[in-house]
Image: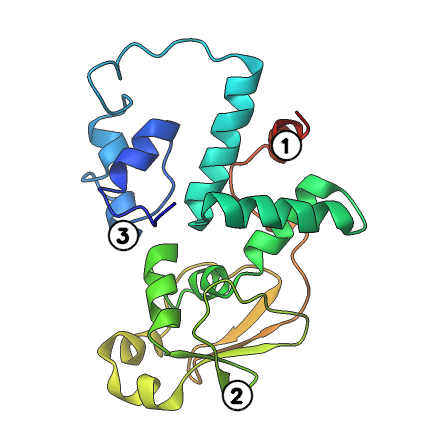
Amino acid sequence: MARYTEAVCRLCRREGMKLYLKGDRCYSDKCGVTRRPQAPGQHGTGRRKLSEYGLQLREKQKARRIYGVLEKQFANYFVKAEKMKGITGENLLQLLERRLDNVVYRLGFAQSRPQARQLVRHGHITVNGRKVNIPSFLVDLDDIVAVKAKSASEVEHFKLLKEGTGRTVAPWLEVNYEALEAKVVSLPSREDIDVEIQEHLIVEYYSH
């Protein structure tokens, strides 16, 4: 399956909630969910009550869309989460949170996860001093995530970030905006993850 390239506001409307895929626009009155809260399509106003399986499917799709992960990738994360110690659903969310594109977003280096993914792909981000252009790269405890020195001095977006963003940074990350670098001080726990996902429904979906 190819990466979704159509209007992302449709994805938010399909899930019936803001997925924060367009940065600042999601907080304004231009937000697609605010302006047109019904699902997209001619039958969007007539939502039917979902079956148990339908609820599980929608929760899985919601998580995929929030983190920008393709179907096969998501299934692979679930398999990996099952093999880890602890609760499978929480393990799954921890893996998704540890993705480099998500970390860049959580640090406030990008306004949205799609923008963070683009910054990573364009080679602006380093991990432990080495350029990493793979958005799915998983950070680990004590890793140092930073903006490449050349990008920090030449790209206007990063110059503005040195003054801070005013956004709350995830508690498992410690950031220095002046240096545009951060440290992974702990791995994310369920309490640290503020996404509105009922992970037990995703576990039930893959249990069929």
| Residue pictured at 34% horizontal, 48% vertical | 2
Residue 73 versus residue 46 in the image, above or below: below
The circle drawn on residue 11 is none
Relative horizontal placement of residue 135, taking residue 20 as reference (left or right): right
**Dot 2 alpha-carbon crowd within 10 angstroms: few under 14, some 14 to 19, many 20 or more:** some
The residue singled out by tag 1 in the image is 206
- Tell me the residue at 32%/84% (across/down): 151
Q: Mark 1 or mark 2: which comes first in sequence?
A: 2
User: Which residue is under mark 3?
Assistant: 24
Is the Cβ of the residue at disc 3 closer than 8 Å to that at disc 1? no
* Residue 93 position in % (x across, y down): 61, 47
In terms of secondary structure, where does tag 1 sit? helix
Q: Looking at the image, which residue is at 36% across and 45% down?
A: 20
Query: Can residue 151 be spotted in the picture?
Result: yes
Q: Residue 129 shows which numbered tag?
A: 2
Of the residues shown, which amino acid type is indicated by label 1?
Tyr
Number of marks in the image?
3
Q: Earlier in the sequence, mark 3 or mark 1?
A: 3
